[in-house]
Amino acid sequence: SDTGFTMLVEGADSCRELGYMPLMAPYLAEKAKAMEEKDKEISRLKLSIEKSPAIPGCTIMVEGITDEEYLNKAFSIHSSRLFELVSKDKLRVFCSKENGGTKNLGNYVTAWHLSKVDGNLLVIVDNDIAGRDAENQIRQLGNPRIRTIRIPKAPWIERIYRKIVAQECFSAPIETLFSAEVWSALDTRNMLADRSTEELQKCFGHLIGRTKTLDAAIQENIAESDLIFVNKSPHPDKKTKIAKYVCGLAKDNPSVFDNFKELVCKIENCIK
C-alpha cells in the first residue's frame, strides 16, 4: 500500500541519517518485498472478485473450505431462512479455494473493499488472537458494507478460561464448537493432533511454579472431560476428513451442531 511504502521510505531515511543503513538494509528489503507480494496478491484477488458472478444479497466469507461446509450444514439444521437464501443464490458462503487461513482472509477482504462489486460482505473469524487481529484490521477499512462476526467461544473454552483466568490463548477454529464425544471419536480415527507445548505454555505458564510441571498444572486445573480439548487440536491435514465425518454424523444426529445455534443466530441478525 502507499502508506506502508511511505513508512518504509521514511524508515530508510532515518536509518541512513543515523548510520544504521548497512544493518537495516536487509530487513527493509525483505519488508518491501513482502509488501510488494501482498499488493500483487490483493490486485489478483480484486480482479478475480470483479469477474465472479455477482449475487444480489450478501456474501459470507470464511477462513477455510470446511468452515463453508459446516455453515451450510448448520443453516440446514437451525435456519430454514438462511438455508433457503443459499439455495436461491441470494446468500453465498465463500472461501478462497486456493488457501485458507486468517492471512488470506485479510487479503481477500481488502480486495473486496477495493473492488466495485455490489452487495454486502459478512466475514466470520475465529475466536482467538488471530481472529481478533483480523477483525480489527477489517474494521479499520471503514467500509459499512463489510461486517465481522467472531465464532462464539465453545462451552469448554469458557470453562477453562474462567478456571485459569486467561483470555484467547487457545487457537479456536470452528471445530471447537463440537462436543467432547465428537472429539473423542475423531481422536480414535487419528484425525486430531497433539497441541503444541508452546500453545499450552501460553495458557498455563502462569500456573507453573518452581516445582510444578506443565502437565501437573493442566491436571490440577482441567476437568477430565475437557482434557481432550486441551491436549488435542484438529489435524491441519485432515480437516476435510473431519468435516466429512462430522457432517455424516449430523444426518442421523443433528444435535452434533447444537453449539452452532448462537453463530447462526448472529448471522441471521446481520442478514435481513
Image (cartoon, rainbow, N blue to C red):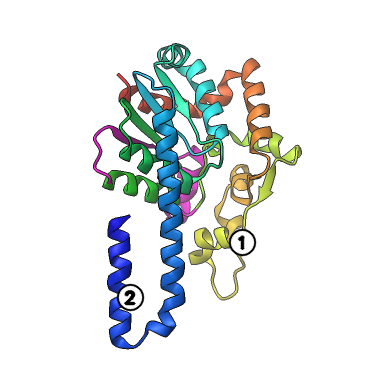
SS class, disc 1: helix
CA distance separating discs 1 and 2: 38 Å
Q: Please tell me which residue is depicted at 49% across the width and 48% down the height of the picture.
A: 160
Question: x%, y% of residue 74?
Answer: 50, 22
Q: Which residues are magenta?
A: 141-169
Q: Which mark is residue 223?
A: none
Question: What amino acid does circle 2 point to?
Answer: Ala
Q: Please tell me which residue is depicted at 32% across the width and 81% down the height of the picture.
A: 15
Closer to us: 269 or 185:
269
Question: x%, y% of residue 177?
Answer: 52, 35
Question: What amino acid does circle 1 point to?
Answer: Thr
| Residue 266 in view | yes
Residue labelled with disc 1: 197
In the picture, measured across the screen, residue 33 lies left or right of residue 10, that is right
Q: Quadrant of the C terminus?
A: top left
Give residue 23's quadrant in the image: bottom left
Please tell me whether residue 254 belongs to the stretch shown in magenta: no
Question: x%, y% of residue 99?
Answer: 55, 42
Closer to us: 190 or 222:
190
Q: Quadrant of the N terminus?
A: bottom left
Residue labelled with disc 2: 12
SS class, disc 2: helix
